[in-house]
Amino acid sequence: AMEMSDATAAMSALSQPTRYRCFQLLIQRGQASAGELAEALGTPANLLSSHLSILSAARLITSVREGRSIIYAPDKARLAELISHLVSMASA
C-alpha cells in the first residue's frame, strides 16, 4: 500500500498546472525528451527542468539518458498505486 507521504507528494506534484500538463503529455506520448516537452508545453526549457525534477522526486516519472538527451517517461505503476490508494480511501 502507498504511504500517505508518497500520496501527498504525488498529488502535490500534480497540483501545479504545467506539471499536470507535462505528466498528461507523457502519459499520452509514452516518452519524450525535455526539449520536446518544453516545445509542446510552450515552457522555457530551464523552467521545465525544475518541474521535471519535482515530478521525478515524487516518482511519477522516470528518466534515461540517451546520448545528449534525457528521455522522460511516466511511471504508470506509480500512477496505478496512487489511484488504488485514492479508491481505497473512497471505499473505506
Image (spheres, grey):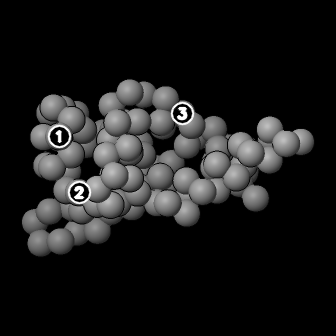
| Mark-to-mark CA distance, 1 and 2 | 10 Å
Is 26 placed left or right of 78 in the picture? left
State which tag comes first along the sequence, 1 or 2.
Answer: 2
On the question of residue 40 being in view, the answer is yes
Say which label, 3 or 2, has the lower sequence index. 3
**Residue drawn where x is 65% and y is 44% of the image:** 7
Question: x, y (%) of residue 67?
Answer: 12, 72
Label disc, if present, on residue 11 of the rendered structure? none
Q: Residues within 10 Å of mark 2 (few under 14, many from 20)?
A: many
Which dot marks residue 12?
3
Q: Position of residue 91 (x, y in %)?
A: 85, 42
Tell me whether the residue at label 1 lies in contact with that at label 2, contact meaning CB atoms closer than 8 angstroms.
yes
Q: Quadrant of the C terminus?
A: top right
Report the Cα–Cα distance between label 1 and label 3: 23 Å
Where disc 2 sits, the SS reads strand
* Residue at numbered disc 2: 32
Q: Residue at x 40, y 36 (%)?
A: 20
As drawn, the residue found furthest toward the right would be 92
Q: Amino acid at mark 3?
A: Ser
- Secondary structure under badge 3? helix
- Looking at the rendered structure, the kind of residue marked 2 is Ala
**Label number found at residue 40:** 1
Specify the quadrant of the image occupied by residue 4. top right
